[in-house]
Amino acid sequence: MSSLMDELARLRESAMSDVAAAGSTEELEEVSVRFVGRKARVNEILKGIRGLEDADKRVVGPAANALRKDVEEAVRSRREQLEREREVVLLATDRLDLTLTGRRPPRGAPNPLTEVTRSLEDVFVGLGYEVAEGPEVETDWNNFQALNTPPDHPARSEMDTFYVPNPHGGPPGLLRTHTSPVQVRVMSSRTPPIYVVCPGRTFRRDTADATHSPMFHQIELLAVDEGLSMADLRGTLEAFAEGAFGRGTRIRLVPHFFPFTEPSAELEVSCPLCRGTGCSQCASGWLEIGGAGMVDPNVLVNVGIDPERYTGFAFGMGIERVAMIRYGVADLRLFFEADVRFLDQFRGIPVTS
Ligand code: PHE
């Protein structure tokens, strides 16, 4: 008997010390199975009680049951302790500092070319024009032929471009060399009066340098109505120049040639940097800005408009050129390189003075 009581005492001792030594809930579970699980020694002892003397039964039974109860209790409290410790560790490692300020995503801004385009659109919309757009891949007819530029016309050599195979097997398409084909599209699909402004991306087979790029942008204006004359074109360009380059900007029209306008002119504005007195940007006090003229009657015939009844004028210019003047940028490639250090300088600079 005393040997059973001794054994229970030894079991108690090693159970208690193993419970205390368990470093994780898994380890504790294993200790628990070993000392109070189904196959534990204490259960064997309890089963064997029936065969003991009465006097022994009275001592060994309660001692074995007490052992079970105490070990289970010790396991429970050790488990609680381990779980609390685990929580403390978790709280420390998953710590979230709600007082930290958030990380603001950097704020973007439109490219300066977009800003200039929008401001020029605004000037023309203020003069009563509506914005019209067309595709960047055009037909030879819209880009050249309808604009009085047949296949053998020498003016084509100034506008060599990139040709795009036609998936339907017809004549190839081309990347438009100017925004003028939008004129053709608008005139072919509407009847006058027409007052539109056409901004967009254009392409030419040019080697990139400080003032050339195979991809650039233009904005173009077209008016077709009864009785329009060169005087209307001039008045419109004067209003535009002041809107785009600031009050007091003067213009002059220098004779020029375009296949689709007659007469044609180059538009020059008084240099907004030196107010026309002459500086390193302009030398002469004048800056060449774009081309203009009265729509050639042949073009009107090509788009089905009666040139005896209607006349029109058109004007086109490069957006990059205007942006370079406005912002004092010497190399237009900078606008396309997406270098935030460059682009960031224009944030919030007003586009017109
Ligand atoms: N399309 C001409 C060019 O790109 C510019 C222009 C437009 C000239 C409208 C006259 C009238 O060179």
Image (spheres, rainbow, N blue to C red):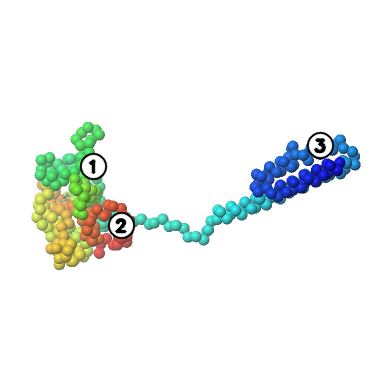
Name which residue type carries label 1: Val
Name which residue type carries label 2: Leu
Q: Is residue 217 visible?
A: yes
* Mark 3 crowdedness (10 Å alpha carbons): few <14, some 14-19, many ≥20: few
Quarter-of-image position of residue 352: bottom left
Residue closest to the eye, 112 or 69: 69
Q: Earlier in the sequence, mark 3 or mark 1?
A: 3
Looking at the rendered image, the disc whose residue lies closer to the viewer, 3 or 1, is 3
Residue closest to the eye, 336 or 318: 336
Q: Where is residue 305 in the image (x, y as percent from the top left)?
A: 15, 44
Indicate which disc residue 72 carries: none
- Give the residue drawn at x 86%, y 43%: 2
Position of residue 227 in the picture relative to residue 320 (left or right): left
Residue closest to the eye, 180 or 17: 17
- Give the residue drawn at x 66%, y 46%: 25
- Give the residue drawn at x 20%, y 42%: 162
Per the image, the residue denoted by label 3 is: 47
Per the image, the residue denoted by label 1 is: 137
Per the image, the residue denoted by label 2 is: 343
Quarter-of-image position of residue 252: bottom left
Q: Position of residue 111 (x, y in %)?
A: 30, 55
Name which residue type carries label 3: Lys
Question: SS at mark 2?
Answer: helix
Q: Position of residue 240 (x, y in %)?
A: 20, 59
* Mark 2 crowdedness (10 Å alpha carbons): few <14, some 14-19, many ≥20: some
